Amino acid sequence: MSKKIAIIPARGGSKRIPRKNIKEFHGKPIIAYSIETAIKTGLFDEVMVSTDDVEIAEIAKSYGATVPFLRNTELSNDIATTASVLINVLDEYKKLGSTYDYVCCIYPCAPFLTKERLIKSMVLLEESNTDSVIPVVKYSYPPQRGLVIQNDEAFMMQPENYDVRSQDLESIYHDAGQFYCIKVKSLYSQKKLFCKKSLPVILSKSDVQDIDTYEDWREAEIKYQILKEKDANILKYILGTVQFGLKYGINNETEMPTQEQVFSMLSYAYDCNIKCLDTASGYGVSEEIIGKFTKETGKRFDICTKYSGKGNLLLELENSLSKLNIERVYLYYLHKYDDCKNEAILSELRECKKKGVIEKIGISIYTPDELRFIIENMSDVIDVVQIPFSIFDCTRWINITKLAQESGIEVFCRSIFLQGVLFMKQNDDFIVTYNASRHIEYVQELCKKYNTTIENLAFSFCKCFSQLTGILFGCDTVEQLKNNIDTINNQIHIKYQDIEDIITSMSDINMKLIDPREWSK
């Protein structure tokens, strides 16, 4: 298997912005963004920082990078090329017994870098006949219309383009200055980052910001804040995969999908920008199928998986990673509430997070009282809670999830269709048993009022609550998935008064109806 290394060159002697590489940027040293993004990809056997500076080295290590040696003084001046630094690092690793096939040079001041961009570039490098892959951005104004000033007079560089319309001029791009993905043999033979055979990854202007002056720095801070606020308002949609490995749902009359059908669903979801999956070791063969899909297609999802609460957590996590064909998970859930009171389990989770094996720690819960305990005792450990939330059981969750949001805990919701109960008819035995005919009728009347489907009403209702940051939904067939994604893209606006009315109307619902654990009793 090919080996990959990410090298972040960060000397201590920056002149225009002193100590730039560790200057605080939105709450942490700017180099931390490059380190954390590289680690999150799960691509690299090593993420290291090449520096001549002891303070930078210590900060880099605190964010998960390695610094096995300091850079020599000859390679720490203003005239040393980045290519020479990379080659020196690779030479030093050879002395330590490690060689690599691919190297990714990531600049330390790249807070707009994303793991998706790095993954796309490294996959492109591996799968194509090229020496390097570089991110580029289009010039905002055609350089062909550029001016030079001589003796205080302005002249066009290319006067032949004076009357040519801007849209008729060839698009020209420049290096985005974030990273370079290079085959090691090409780096050694050409001693350049931008090799003879290079493929571009085109970025938008909003993804790129040079940071060479204090003015650049301030612009970057403003742009980052705008993007952060924009992302905060984007609801994460998560595809549940329990149906891929088990027959699931009280109203489910379909058979388990075949591997081919699952692959079709995963491909369609990925292409529609649904790039987060929820699974568990207890979901039959779900993890194995996802792992096969990743291996065969190269399409990587953010993975949320769960500890069963049985046996060794570290061993179970290791098995899940192996089956999923990944090196780290986006979110690792405790599946049993009592486990959050087990200090040994929490200690193992903290250590896994520190090592970068998991990005976020979560817990799947059932009741508001459980969430209250977590808010009051565990907001420093738990990053995400997953709760059952639907039109039927919204009343009990509204206030407590606001408290979770204020405590910095993200709230993902599941069972927005209550495992299919929302689609049942008023006279179905199950509905009659729990005296919920009136509630079903109410949902149906709402659908008529808004001229929409139950699916759309359910998704749109969840979106009304800002404290919900993720919505989990499942599907049994490609057709269901397409319908759900179609619904997500065409949600309705529910009036505030109707939201209030829904909350009031559902306040007397039978609690056994909204808790699947009670259905078999």
Image: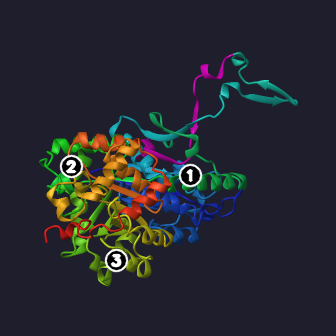
Of callouts 2 and 1, the N-terminal one: 1
The CA span between labels 2 and 3 is 36 Å
Residue 27, horizontal then vertical, whole percent: 58, 67
- At label 3, counting other C-alpha atoms closer than 10 Å, the crowd grade (few under 14, some 14-19, many 20 or more) is few
Identify the residue at image location x=26%, y=48%: 294
Q: Which residue is mark 1?
A: 227
Q: Which residue is mark 2?
A: 292
Numbered label attached to residue 370 = 3
Q: Quadrant of the C terminus?
A: bottom left
Residue 336, horizontal then vertical, whole percent: 26, 74
The quarter holding residue 442 reads bottom left
* Circle 3: residue type: Glu
* Circle 2: residue type: Lys
Residue 480, horizontal then vertical, whole percent: 25, 43
The CA span between labels 2 and 1 is 34 Å
Of callouts 3 and 1, the N-terminal one: 1
* Labels 2, 1: front one: 1
As helix, strand or loop, the secondary structure at mark 1 comes to helix
Residue 469 in sight? no
Q: Is residue 179 magenta?
A: yes
Residue 443, horizontal then vertical, whole percent: 32, 53
Name the residue furthest right.
152
- What stretch of residues is rendered in magenta? 164-190
As helix, strand or loop, the secondary structure at mark 2 comes to helix
Identify the residue at image location x=88%, y=29%: 151
